[in-house]
Image (spheres, grey):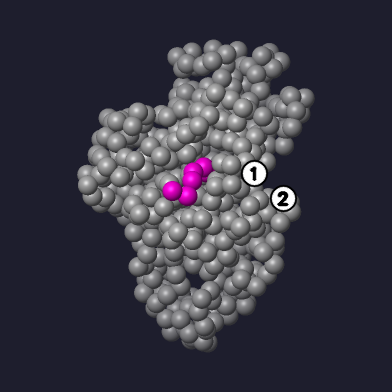
Amino acid sequence: MISYLIKNCKIYENKGNSILVENNIIKNIGTNLKPVGKLPVIDLKNKYIYPGFTDAHLHSFTSSQMAKYVDLSNCKSDKELISTIEKFIKVNKIGNGKMVVGVKYAHDLVPTSKLLDYFKNNPIYIIRVCLHIAVANKLAIKLVKHVNNENGVYKEDAIIKYLEGLPPLSLKDTEKALFDYFHYLKAQGNTYLQSNDIDNPYKKSTVYKALLNLNKNNKLPVHIYEQVVARNENDVKQAIELIKTTPKTEKLTFYSVKLFADGSLGAKTAYMLKPYENSKNQGKLNHSTKEMYKMISLVNKARIPCAIHAIGDGAVEQVISCYERLSKIYARNTLIHVQTGNIKQYQRIKKLGLNICFQPQFISSEYPMVLERIGKAREKTSYALGSWTKLGINVSGGSDSPVELPIPLYGIFAAVTRTDLNDKPNGGWYKEQCISVKQAIAMYTTNAAYEMNLENELGKIKVGYRANFVALDKDLLKINKKDIKNAKVVWTS
């Protein structure tokens, strides 16, 4: 619908109970507004309406494929792992020689390749929940021989290269997978996405073509701002060319260049200033500082936003130091994740005007491992949402799906309680880092809009702004914070 009237609603940060929309722009907000002529009317029956949510960082195409894989998130032992895969093969009638991919594995690092050799008839490839380490059995290793591995273990770029070595989906199947997943995202209250889907070979990639086709045929139910991955200087040049030459439309914009400074905390590949606890391992930088500075400079010169994955405090340091060397910063750039760091680094991020895109659900899922990975002193200043907010850093919220579920309400819940969905740990993990409900909602609305240079037209229910809404069955400001996770989406524009 382009023009319509919403009635019988309780409007976030507004008085009145009805909203008039003309040509997808909010025309009026008032009490008991009346439709003109045959204008469609949406009766929300006293539900609560908020600005539509933005997932500021996720992997839509990868997520669309995960539904076809075996979910290993509940496996707590080797025995459970084997049993889960066996059941998946049996239930899905997967024949001999067919590939089985396991995802969301979170028990320890990864199982050994030798353990997976239990499966004599099927190639098995398991990706840890962090997406930064994977393992294959002998049959799976033989399928993609050209990708380097260490006894069947693949790390960082090698994980993607392995998957790229498998037979690709057709364009038609790619479109169908994305179409279905975008509708799922909309049902969770997401109206805008910053999605990380386009990689080399860029314009020749099936995902790029699928997105263009869906957009051309008016089949995108959400607005997409794409982060285009670059893994070296040549990639950066191609990514810039793609962003500059692909027309921007209402529903699809190729927006920023995505770089990776390091790996993940779970896989111990995130680069730390000092080694991991009880270890000599510091993780690893993906690029020398010279290389990173060159890539950042190229993107900055092109006046295109740069979104950089940086998890370890050493990687955060590298990226900050590169931006400090620039004579002028031309775009709104973002550090993604920033799971570890210290207050001096956060102050420098604020001074540079960098955004942070954080995944509050990481608090819920990762707090049990952080102490073991980096020790008490560094743990205290990690996942520091409260500190960033107090400093005035613009912090957006994302899910990093498929790492976490792309459900903004879960992110808001985690940001205000710092617990998991079972309300553990009691009182919250470093509860002084909790933020208010309004601040958490802003992560998925106004803050995300600012990050995309849309703060004057998106993220608020305000006359003149874009008509992007999500209606919930609960008032997030009045219910017990523990109940936020139980709120339901009843309508999304």
Find residue 447 and report its horizontal and vertical position in percent: 44, 60
Quadrant position of the N terminus in the picture: bottom left
* Magenta region, main secondary structure: loop
Amino acid type at circle 2 is Pro
Q: Label 2 near label 1: C-beta < 8 Å?
A: yes
Q: Which residue appears at 42% of the width and 81% of the height?
A: 28
Label 2 SS? loop
Q: Is residue 299 left or right of residue 213?
A: left
| Residue occupied by mark 1 | 367
Question: Would you identify the image quadrant in which residue 258 lies?
Answer: top left
Q: Residue 1, relative to residue 16: is it above or below?
A: above
- The reply to whether residue 71 is visible in this rendering is no
**Side of 181 where 410 appears, left or right:** right
Secondary structure type for disc 1: helix
Question: What is the span of residues highlighted in magenta in the rendered image?
Answer: 339-344
For image coordinates 47% across by 39% down, the residue present is 313
Q: Is residue 155 above or below residue 223?
A: above
Q: Earlier in the sequence, mark 1 or mark 2?
A: 1
Residue indicated by mark 2: 425
**Disc 1 to disc 2, C-alpha distance:** 9 Å
- 64 and 265: which is toward the camera: 265
Label 1 sits on what residue type? Tyr
- Image mark count: 2
Q: Which one is nearer the viewer's eye here, 213 or 156?
A: 156
- Tell me if I can see residue 124 in this picture: yes
